[in-house]
Amino acid sequence: MINTIANGERVVSGMRPTGRLHLGHYHGVLRNWVALQQDNECYFFVADWHALTTAYDEREVISKHVWDMVVDWLACGVNPSLSTLFIQSRVVEHAELHLLLSMIAPLGWLERVPTYKDQIEQLREKDLATYGFLGYPVLQSADILIYGASGVPVGEDQVSHVELTRELARRFNHLFGREPGFEEKAEAAIAKMGKKAAKLYRELRRRFQEQGDAEALKEAQALLGEQQNITLADSARLAGYLEGGGRSVLVEPEALLTEAPKMPGLDGRKMSKSYGNALSLRESDADIEHKIRTMPTDPARVRRNDPGEPTKCPVFDLHKVYSDEGTREWVEHGCRSAGIGCLECKRPVIEAVQAEVGPIRERAEALEQDPEQVRQTIYEGCERARGVAHETMQAVRAAMGLDYRPR
Ligand code: TRP
Ligand code: SF4
């Protein structure tokens, strides 16, 4: 399912600095960021703390890729005059919110996040039985909630983290989102309903809150609708009190899934650095040509005049991303009739990839000549992000009763 958001929303997303970016990142993530920034207030950050949760023993790798990654973002068209670009660890408020959310994050919720067990399984060689790794979805929740974001562009694999973020926001609002004296005001309102109605309201509320009895909730709401002698404000209070809610301090976000095609790698599997099947965003024309020319094709096409089957060929997957319908028909027909050779078939893909990567590579090279500009962009982004994060934290601290004043 693809979720869309209205224009003018807050959007947050982060990317781990774990390696050079490739065409998979471009088609899967960055093109979407570039589109979102046109009409939304976007915050995009280098998730360096997240990288440390699994790569805590690879600090050189992380620090090297932080700047390379920002350069790649800018080269792909992420625009610092439209979006706020920053580095997570330079906005330390994320850590404060992470800590405060961790107070109310039930262990069971964290152990049930599907990526938790999966990753431990997949990264066997690493000791991930750490506090930081278990808590990493709470850190991600803090990243999102601190900007009051309503939309989070992520891949399928991250949807459960956005779901956890919603649950933590709801739990926070439930525990801390009440106006001062909320309970007293609600109790006073109950008393105004008259003895019989008050008793029934209390009974129904208890049934809903203790047993999750949805019928009781409905009945109590109907009961509130019938009351003549309480004000509208009291009625709203009692509706909130019924469900255990209050004011929202933290905004519940939604995942924004992209409709981007899965970018196939050179071997037909999903493009990924770890499979060694990627084309980087800095690839030279000669390397693009070489890598695509040596790509495997339908194994049944051993000789030039053996017919082939495009659906069994990774080159055809690239045609699906890069070629128009006419070209794809030319491939299908030419391949099945052995009318074209594989090198001939690869030519339009080579040219399309070169045309796409060329300008990105050139912009990246220019930015690398001007590190001061990149540094300045990030400096300004960190300042702006800190401003928003600071405001949220004031509301969070006040809601949690941490805004002490001398008496
Ligand atoms: N966890 C994400 C990943 O591994 C990166 C990330 C960190 C993120 N914080 C975020 C994504 C907040 C979206 C919003 O890819
Ligand atoms: Fe693949 Fe094209 Fe060769 Fe057919 S002609 S096997 S689609 S590279």
Image (cartoon, grey):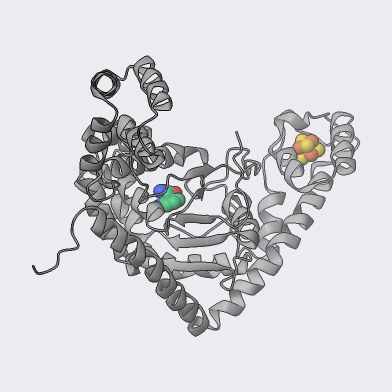
- 60 lies above or below 316: below
Image x and y of residue 118, in percent: 36, 33
For this view, does 352 lie left or right of residue 144? right
Of 366 and 354, which appears nearest the observer?
366
For this view, does 350 lie left or right of residue 119? right
Image x and y of residue 345, in percent: 82, 44
Quick check: can you spot residue 374?
yes
Number of numbered discs overlaid on the protein picture? 0
Looking at the rendering, the quadrant in which ligand 2 lies is top right
Quarter of the image with the N terminus in it = top right
The residue sitting at 45% across, 74% down in the picture is: 378
Of 271 and 167, which appears nearest the observer?
167
The residue sitting at 44% across, 68% down in the picture is: 86
Quarter of the image with the C terminus in it = bottom left
Quick check: can you spot residue 301?
no
- 16 lies above or below 342: below
Q: Residue furthest front?
A: 229
Of 259 and 152, which appears nearest the observer?
152
Where residue 355 sits, quadrant-wise, is bottom right
Where residue 112 sits, quadrant-wise, is top left
Image x and y of residue 41, in percent: 55, 62
Image x and y of residue 357, in percent: 68, 62
The residue sitting at 24% across, 59% down in the picture is: 397
Of 85 and 174, which appears nearest the observer?
174
Q: Residue furthest left?
A: 407
